[in-house]
Image (cartoon, rainbow, N blue to C red):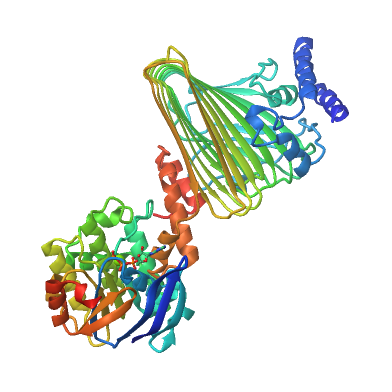
């Protein structure tokens, strides 16, 4: 599904990713762990099409050159990023945003766009599953949402758009135990033999709820070690020092 | 320009039945205007908008005479649908229709003041020009305790029979104690390259409420100046909202005198400009008594090489203790050629007051665009959502829900 070969990225002449390789097959869950500033969010941003990086190397998504696709086309093709810091967008009603987003993606996939009633029914259902207070959907997008509510809103968007590749950038940071379980449930519901996940986290705890197939350690812009779920336990115990 | 002015002036007073004294006053105003000419950037109030140059570059030579003797046919297709309203229709600066069909007839008085010159002074030469050339002048008097059932829309239209390149008009309003009026000044002018010079005077008695909405939304090549003087007694409220968008050039001046205690004034506005349009709002709020309040919020979205100017002055005299004055302007520049100028001014002579002002401008937030696009929205969709979101809180300041919805529709804000 996703194939990253020798990815390098710089911003303002500062090198952030340095020869990164990663393969994700359909149905797999990969976790990336790594110290602050090692380039995890940069990788997520580049995969979803954020501008401003100078990149080299190759990224293939379903055999196609990802760099040929605009940001919104990547979303249409099924890439989703749950932001580490979801943005507040004043004046934009959350429901209107969700509907515009869902219909843009549905249209691109050749599916029928939802009318207001169909949409509300769906969003109601999904918010209930995620125990997301529906009243918030009538508020301005993320404005005045608590940290945890913003993260839940990301997962709500993920479950509405049902992407093929979901990248979760520290979605677990700032969530209480109950919310963590709910988010994990959201991921596990979407998990099947076609959908893949790239989960960025600092804590092994999330991985108790979402069992990864692979765990990678990212340091100084490249993956320095890969392994199974045990690697996360080892990191939790020993920290990153051994990998330097 | 001098000969043209004198010739057109002589032609236009021929049609009026004025006393010798009134003619003398008009002549005096004409001479003043000839003396001073159009305002230019050397005058402090006009330093961001050199009207003299703007007229020269956009229109060239002006002419001033309009045949006000014959009537024009009212084009009813310009009337706003889906909102019952009273109407005043100006065509080529001539008042063609005053209609208060929805109201109790004995509660509104329409007084023809054409024969009595009441000089309008606002310290620039445009009041002289207006005094010299306005033809008909009416005063709308809303009687004590009467609240108009429907809003009043003033239509400013032009047709192909227009002669002059300059239109001067004037209206006076008096809202007696406890009365209220909702007013929409709507510009439907399609004529090319005229200069409109508009003077309104509002007198708000105790507890009166004026909602004054100015909508310049439709594309046109005209140059507009609109001066609004608002005198306010005790407890009265004036709410002004300006949608500044359609004309090539426009300058709205709001001059509020908060004479009575607890009087309050709200001035909110949107500049939505493209191409090389140049618009300005100049407000002067004079806090002249205790416990008066003013609030101003101006937001701009400027594309291409457009330019917006906001000059807001809050004046507080020594009697006006416990004044509350607030002013904020924010601009989004969509193009590096676009420009926003804010000049806030505070002049305070009382010690127990709360006054603040602020101004910020920047480009559209790239991170927000990325966030929206990463959810499948196109650049265009994302930009539109962000712009509408940016403007929403100013539109929400409109306290009349019917008119708020009308304006939301006009600028394409969906709910
Ligand atoms: N726009 C930018 N300009 C300059 N430097 C940047 C920019 N964005 C990121 N960086 C730098 O790149 C490095 C990697 O940042 P990144 O956000 O990818 O780290 P991260 O692994 O996600 O860290 P964290 O665990 O704290 O979220 C950091 O040193 C950061 O300061
Ligand atoms: Mg990060």
Q: Quick check: A116 above or below A76?
A: above
- Asked if one can make out residue B161 in the rendered structure from this viewpoint, the answer is no
The quarter of the rendering in which ligand 2 is drawn is: bottom left
| Picture quadrant where residue B295 is located | top left
Give left or right: position of B390 versus B34.
left
Q: Quadrant of the N terminus of chain B?
A: top right
Quarter of the image with the C terminus of chain B in it? bottom left
Viewer-side residue, B180 vs B375: B375
Instruction: Estimate the x, y position of residue B153 in percent, counting from the top left.
Output: 54, 37
The percent position of residue B239, horizontal first and vertical second, equals 46, 31
Q: Nearer the viewer, residue B194 or A3?
A: A3
When the figure is inspected, residue A10 is found, relative to residue B132, above or below; the finding is below
x 14%, y 73%: residue: A238
Q: Nearer the viewer, residue B314 or A228?
A: A228
The relative height of residue B7 versus residue A5 in the rendered view (above or below) is above
Seen in the image, is B307 located left or right of residue A218? right
Q: Is residue A25 left or right of residue B294?
A: left
Residue B120 image position (x, y, % from top left): 65, 19
Residue projecting furthest to the top: B21
Q: x and y percent of residue A19 in the render? A: 38, 81
Residue at 44 percent across and 71 percent down: it is: A10
Is residue A152 among the parts visible in the rendering? yes
**Which residue is drawn at the image coordinates 25% and 69% (left, top)?**
A35
Q: Is residue B383 above or below residue B290?
A: below
**Number of marks in the image?**
0
């Amino acid at each position: 599904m996703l194939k990253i070969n020798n990815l390098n990225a710089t911003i303002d002449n500062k090198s952030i990713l340095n020869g990164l390789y990663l393969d994700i097959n359909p149905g797999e869950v990969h976790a990336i762990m790594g110290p602050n500033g090692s380039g995890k969010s940069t990788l997520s941003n580049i995969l979803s099409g954020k501008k401003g990086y100078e990149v080299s190397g190759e990224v293939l998504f379903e055999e196609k050159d990802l760099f040929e696709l605009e940001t919104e086309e990547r979303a249409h093709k099924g890439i989703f990023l749950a932001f580490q810091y979801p943005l507040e967008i004043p004046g934009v009603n959350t429901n209107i945003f969700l509907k515009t987003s869902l219909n843009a993606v549905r249209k691109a996939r050749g599916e029928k766009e939802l009318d207001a009633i169909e949409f509300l029914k769906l969003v109601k259902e999904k918010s209930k599953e995620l125990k997301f207070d529906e009243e918030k959907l009538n508020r301005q997008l993320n404005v005045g949402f608590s940290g945890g509510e913003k993260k839940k809103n990301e997962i709500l968007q993920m479950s509405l758009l049902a992407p093929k590749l979901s990248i979760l950038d520290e979605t677990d940071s700032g969530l209480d135990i109950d919310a963590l379980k709910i988010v994990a449930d959201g991921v596990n519901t979407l998990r099947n033999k076609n959908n893949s996940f790239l989960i960025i986290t600092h804590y092994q705890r999330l991985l108790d709820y979402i069992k990864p197939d692979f765990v990678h350690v990212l340091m100084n812009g490249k993956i320095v070690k890969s392994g199974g779920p045990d690697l996360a336990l080892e990191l939790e115990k020993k920290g990153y020092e051994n990998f330097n | 320009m001098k000969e043209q002015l004198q010739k057109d002036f002589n032609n236009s007073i021929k049609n009026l039945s004025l006393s010798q004294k009134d003619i003398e006053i008009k002549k005096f105003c004409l001479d003043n205007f000839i003396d001073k000419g159009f305002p230019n950037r050397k005058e402090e109030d006009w330093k961001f908008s050199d009207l003299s140059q703007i007229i020269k570059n956009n229109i060239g030579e002006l002419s001033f005479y309009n045949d006000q003797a014959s009537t024009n046919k009212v084009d009813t297709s310009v009337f706003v649908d889906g909102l019952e309203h009273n109407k005043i229709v100006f065509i080529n600066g001539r008042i063609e229709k005053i209609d208060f069909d929805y109201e109790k007839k004995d509660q509104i008085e329409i007084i023809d003041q054409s024969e009595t010159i009441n000089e309008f002074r606002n310290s620039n030469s445009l009041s002289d020009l207006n005094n010299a050339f306005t033809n008909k002048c009416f005063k709308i008097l809303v009687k004590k305790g009467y609240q108009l059932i429907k809003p009043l829309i003033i239509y400013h239209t032009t047709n192909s029979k227009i002669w002059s390149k300059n239109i001067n008009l004037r209206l006076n309003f008096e809202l007696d104690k406890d009365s209220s009026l909702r007013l929409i000044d709507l510009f439907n002018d399609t004529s090319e390259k005229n200069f409109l010079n508009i003077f309104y005077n509002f007198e708000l008695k105790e507890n009166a409420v004026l909602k004054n909405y100015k909508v310049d939304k439709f594309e046109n090549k005209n140059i507009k100046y609109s001066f609004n003087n608002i005198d306010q007694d005790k407890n009265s409220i004036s709410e002004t909202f300006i949608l500044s968008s359609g004309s090539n050039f426009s300058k709205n001046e709001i001059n509020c005198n908060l004479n009575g205690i607890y009087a309050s004034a709200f001035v909110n506005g949107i500049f939505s400009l493209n191409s090389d349009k140049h618009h300005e709002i100049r407000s002067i709020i004079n806090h002249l008594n205790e416990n008066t309040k003013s609030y101003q919020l101006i937001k701009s979205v400027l594309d291409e090489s457009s330019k917006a100017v906001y000059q807001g002055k809050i004046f507080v005299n020594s009697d006006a203790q416990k004044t509350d004055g607030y002013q904020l302007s924010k601009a989004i520049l969509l193009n590096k050629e676009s420009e926003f100028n804010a000049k806030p001014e505070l002049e305070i002579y009382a010690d127990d007051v709360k006054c603040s002002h602020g101004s910020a401008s920047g480009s559209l937030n790239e991170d927000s665009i990325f966030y929206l696009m990463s959810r499948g929205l196109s650049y265009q969709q994302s930009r539109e959502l962000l712009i509408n979101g940016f403007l929403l809180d100013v539109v929400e300041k409109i306290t009349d829900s019917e008119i708020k919805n009308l304006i939301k529709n006009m600028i394409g804000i969906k709910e």
